[in-house]
Amino acid sequence: MDVIVVSHARGKTWKLRLDTAHFHLWLPVLLLAVGALSLSFSVGYYANGKSGKGLLPEHLMTSWSAEIKAQREALTAAKSGSEENTRALARRMAELNAQMMRLDAAGERMVKVADLDPKEFNFNRPPALGGPETEELALAVVAPPQDPLLQSIAQFESKLNERERQMRVLEDLLMASRMQQEVMPSGWPVLTGFVSSLFGYRTDPFSGRGAFHEGIDFAGAHGSGVIAVGAGVVSFAGDRSGYGNLVEINHGNGYVTRYGHNSASLVKAGDTIRKGQRVALMGSSGRSTGPHVHFEVLLNGSPVNPAQYIEASR
């Protein structure tokens, strides 16, 4: 076999014959060349690794390793914090559930105190609700949460909304009840005194004949206070035949009270009156034999026995 070497720079060629007879002469040269190439490749590979060409630089590997370690530590801390927050939230949910139980107990107590129907305000079951399904409601399909803690929160929020509705209705009823108690005539129209004449037929003190007495008389000291037995609005304050100085209060719902024979009125027509407020001073004006208050209760324009309203406050 012949090997031809060409030099373009010098424009020459060399012919080398490689046969069995001359192979032992070229073998050392061939081995030397292979060794030189191997050494050159190893040096270049190592140099490229150190200089950052061809392989990942050592400082980049170190940086990545440190970043991964930092992220792992941050993940561990976040997981620990999340577990602690979950435990804290679970404890808080337990406290809120305990408060909800106390709220239910308070609601049941309020129902008993207000003498309401316990079947209507049953805090052990949700209030009755309903209504037609709207298009928006049909489209708004919300999947229930899968996490047990989130499910507990959703259930608690639902219960809280139910209790809020029940409490709002109960509060309105109690407010209406208190207002009804304020305007409903009840109690004595004087702070001190005694009953001197009852409602019904009696002997008239002036004519001596039988006559119907439309109120109850309370005798007392001249100038002592006359008080309203219910909240309302003064519909009349002034002189009226037979009553003398009269104060009349409209309480609504068909109820009107009258306070007659006063020495002076402390209110005028149109004034808003509180229950227990002084509206006049006791006297003996009009058709009277001495200091007293003629107290009348009218329901839908007709006189009724004030005794039931006087006793209602006891």
Image: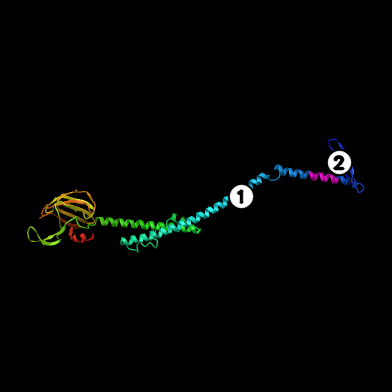
Element at label 2? strand
252 falls in the magenta region:
no
Residue at 31% of width from left, 57% of height from top? 174
- Indicate left or right for 199 with 47 as reference: left
Please, which residue is most extreme toward the right here?
21
Q: Which residues are magenta?
A: 30-39
Write down the residue under mark 1.
Answer: 69
Kind of residue at disc 1: Lys
Coordinates of residue 203 in the picture (x, y in percent): 9, 61
Q: Tag on residue 6?
A: none
Q: Vertical placement of 236 versus 201: above or below?
A: above
- Indicate left or right for 226 with 139 as reference: left
Residue at 34% of width from left, 61% of height from top? 109
Marks 1 and 2, Cα distance to the nearest angstrom? Answer: 59 Å
- Main SS of the magenta part reads helix
Write down the residue under mark 2.
Answer: 5
Coordinates of residue 3 in the picture (x, y in percent): 87, 44
Quadrant placement of the C terminus: bottom left
